[in-house]
Amino acid sequence: MTSALTLPSSELTSSWPDTPPGADPLPGQLDRWLASRGAELVAVRRHIHAHPELSYHEFETAALVARELAVAGLKPRFLPKGNGVICDIGTGDRVIAFRADLDALPIQDTKDVAYRSTVDGVMHACGHDVHTTILLGLGLALAKLNEEGQLPGRVRLLFQPAEESIPSGAPHVIAAGGLKDVAAIFALHCYPQLPAGLVGVRSGPFTAAADTLEVRLRGAGGHTARPHLTTDLVHALGRVIVDVPALLDRRMDARAGVSMVWGTVHAGEAYNAIPAEGYAKGTIRILSREAWREAPELITRLIKDVVAATGAEADVVYTRGVPPVINDRMTSAVIAAAAGAALGPERVVEAEISMGGEDFAFYLEQVPGTMIRLGTSTPGSEIRRDIHQAGFDVDERAIGYGIRVMAHTALAALASGAF
């Protein structure tokens, strides 16, 4: 790989990990080859971090990825809008896919580092720059194996735009043929609650469905001295805010993992005037795929029933976000074993369930697959900069660990006949 993005050799020691003790080597001297190019990959991550792009505007990031893949002798193709990349490596009818997301968040970068975001109000606060660099490194490593005739099948890299937006980018990748012939798909996500060098794997529910809800009420306003002559909108909103979540808890199976939380409520301005309009907005998060499918009709009906007793009129807008990520049992077993081979079995732990949303779920609606958590905090440090925070950063050794895990996963999945 010849890249214009480089770091001084002094950066390599602190940013690229040694092969963990007890880990299995990658074939074709890939461990040594990756280590020799570690500084270049770290430089790629820092360049992307310094030049973030918001959802649906990832044109320069996609172009950078495509250039690096082309230098390695691969044939990447852009999504129709040019803000994402699909690239196959090797040959075969059965494809193993890997996905990374490209977009950043509208958050101000407050870190005092050389690679701080140069775009005001935009930063990679969720680690997508790390995800992209790991997938790029995986592609370069597998391209080398393929050149040497040691890649036993076909692997597809999916560099996806707009994970952070609604509607999100995964359906666009699927529409562009991203899942054609795919037997299984894998992804990872930065997780600062784990130190670099550890990964979390979990079969079954992994992240929640994430939908949005808006309730607008209307009625005759008036003086607070005569509420009986009005439709008391504030009282009606209070009923919606309190009663609907309580009723929902009794109408859905508790094992479905349903969370209904209001984020904003507004009605009126004057303390002594009952308003004629008001609204509440919030989120619905659900771990069960079946409960998620039932939620819009049930929640809309509950709201209408609660509001009917108040005399107000209600408009309900329920907006689908993303389905829940339900990791497949067999692919989870494959990536857990591969991560153990890549890092050592003691470095693979059970991942926690998250109520956050992830549009990787759209792929899992069509093919089996698994997402894992990649530790990104510095081992021994008490500092835990969470994702979506202005000071978020990672221990860059996580890049090397992530590439090793995904390379072992690719080879294990290609060799598996389980899916």
Image (tube, grey):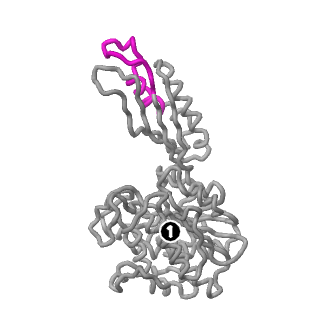
**Residue 72 in which image quadrant:** bottom right
Does residue 270 appear to the left or right of 12 in the view shown?
Answer: left
Between residues 114 and 242, which one lies in front from this camera angle?
114
SS state under label 1 = helix
**Residue 366: x, y in percent?**
66, 56
Which residue is at the front of the view, 44 or 71? 71
Q: Residues within 10 Å of mark 1 (few under 14, many from 20)?
A: many
Q: Please give the residue where the numbered disc 1 appears in the rendered image.
A: 62
Give the percent coordinates (x, y) of residue 364.
61, 57
| Magenta residue check for 15 | no
- Outermost residue on the front side: it is 81
Tell me: 352 left or right of 290. left
Q: Can residue 332 be seen?
A: no
Q: What is the three-letter code of the residue carrying label 1?
A: Ala
| Frontmost residue, 391 versus 245 | 391
- 211 vs 47: above or below: above
Give, as a single range, the part of the protein colored magenta: 217-245
Quadrant housing the C terminus: bottom right
Residue 243 painted magenta = yes
Q: Which residue is drawn at 42% across and 18% down?
A: 220
Q: Is residue 21 above or below residue 337?
A: below
Residue 229: % across, % down: 39, 11
